[in-house]
Amino acid sequence: MDEVVIHTDGGCRGNPGPGAWAAVLRSGDRGRELVGTEAETTNNRMELMAAIKALESLKRPCRARMVTDSKYLKSGITEWLPNWIENGWKNSRRKPVLNRDLWERLRRLCEGHDVRWEWVEGHAGVPDNERCDRLLNEALDRLQRNSPGW
């Protein structure tokens, strides 16, 4: 099984507001960068989309080390998800889980791979985490330039 290290990041300008996500994938001496935008979204949705799009880009089952600076993403997938499912997709306050559509999508994608989740502090000099941040901000800059009235 191939091993890949995936760094992800997502964010918005305003929350909600225009958003972007980015992922940097590395396996051996190969690397790939992915980026995308949405006109109206939230920070949490963009964090989830970064992980989803990275896993969707894998061509075969892999051992993946998923590195994120989002505690929401890491805690959600490693700690909260089993309880949400057991409680009928309700959170600890008995309210519907936000972003359920993306959590279900991410869960299905993880089943096809051996994914280990790792949290790193954002803006702390981790090169591929910093690269993701630059990629998503460049994408947001392009989106802003191309959106009249923004």
Image: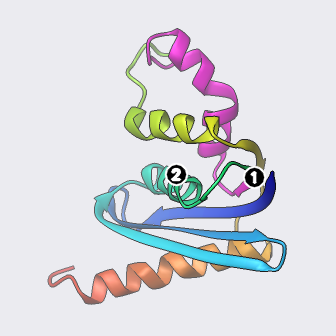
- The residue nearer to you, when weighing 70 against 32, is 32
**Is residue 94 something one can see in this rendering?**
yes
In which quadrant of the rendered view does residue 129 lie?
bottom right
**Residue for badge 2:** 52
Q: Position of residue 84 (x, y in %)?
A: 53, 19
Tell me which corner region of the image, top left, top right, bottom left or bottom right, holds residue 117. Answer: top right
Q: Where does the magenta region start and end?
A: 65-92
> Does the segment drawn in magenta span residue 77?
yes
- Left or right position of 144 against 19: left
Above-or-below relation of 138 to 73: below
Q: As drawn, which residue projects farthest toward the right?
A: 28
Q: Earlier in the sequence, mark 2 or mark 1?
A: 2
Q: Which residue is mark 1?
A: 64
Residue 92 in sight from this viewpoint: no
Residue at image x 64%, y 53%? 60
Residue 95 percent across, percent down from the top left: 39, 18
Q: Is residue 145 left or right of residue 128?
A: left
